[in-house]
Image (cartoon, rainbow, N blue to C red):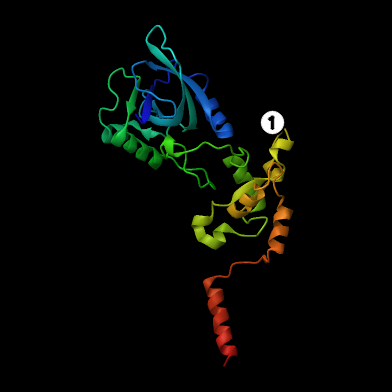
Amino acid sequence: MEAVILAWTTAGPQWSGAYVTAQDTVRKTGIARQHWLVTSDLPLSVGMDVWLLVVDGGAAMRGVVGHGTLARIAPVPREDGMQLLDVDFDLLLQHGDQVPFTLIEQRLPGLLTGETTAVTVDGSVAAELRRMWTEAVVPDQGWVEPPPGALPSRLTRRVSADGVERDPDFRRTALAHRGSACHACGLDMEQTYGEKGRDLVQVHHLTPLAHRGAECDIDPLIDLVPLCPTCHVVAHSRWPDSYSVEEIRAMLRKGGFMRGTIMTKEQLEAESAAARILRG
């Protein structure tokens, strides 16, 4: 089987802690672990996709609201015949942004019936569920990786990332303060690529977090600067002390790069016309 769907009654005891707290944990660390009980007769395997389906609360809440992976299966079922699972959730949507239950019933009729608390799916059913999820989820601004759940877990690899640089609130604040042009090479993504390039600039942490400690307070107005994806890769190509903006500028100067602006089509045509006039 490719995936398991967990039916969540939000008024019940399945979820540990507050859902909004788990959302914040995912946003900051990438993962929020939850323990879950299912019947022991389900064909489960570590690493399979997990979909969280809200089944109560009315139309505004019902639907697929989360994705994760199955991290652990208890080796021995409990005396009541239930199996304990550890699920690592990597994306939890706001209630109201979920894949609506009405859409699921329309495209996958009979998926959950009666008192079913969990069901495994494979093949075309799993693929259709993933399509609906991909249609509903909007990736964070400025990041090019597919959002969690957009690809089967067997085709992905979990990597560590700087949570500060990926925090959408920090990013918006830093760009509003410093502008959207790369502070190393000067590339303005929107000017170069048009409207579609507007959200592609990234932000870089000036002081590596390894030197600041886990409890440090981040000020996006001071600690973050915009970098284009290329310069951002160069910055992090040295570990643990990433290259500074000044060091990247020095690399560009030594490599023959000259900072400037991208000429528009009209400017290029005007220069061509002027050259023709000068040539007589």
The quadrant where residue 251 appears: bottom right
What is the residue that sits farthest to the front in this orientation?
75
Residue 150, given in percent of the width and then of the height, sits at 42, 40
Instruction: Reply above or below: 233 against 106.
Output: below
What is the residue that sits farthest to the top in this orientation?
79
For the point 68% across and 63% down, the residue is: 255
| Identity, as a three-letter code, of the amino acid under mark 1 | Ala
For the point 38% across and 42% down, the residue is: 135
For the point 62% across and 66% down, the residue is: 261
Most foreground residue, 95 or 40? 40
Instruction: Reply above or below: 33 against 39.
Output: below
Q: Which residue is mark 1?
A: 214
Q: Is residue 244 left or right of residue 36?
A: right
For the point 33% across and 26% down, the residue is: 120
The reply to whether residue 97 is in sight is: no
Secondary structure of the residue carrying tag 1 is: loop
Residue 203, given in percent of the width and then of the height, sits at 62, 47
Q: Quadrant where the N terminus lies?
A: top left
Q: Is residue 149 left or right of residue 259?
A: left
Residue 23, given in percent of the width and then of the height, sits at 52, 30
Residue 267, given in percent of the width and then of the height, sits at 56, 75
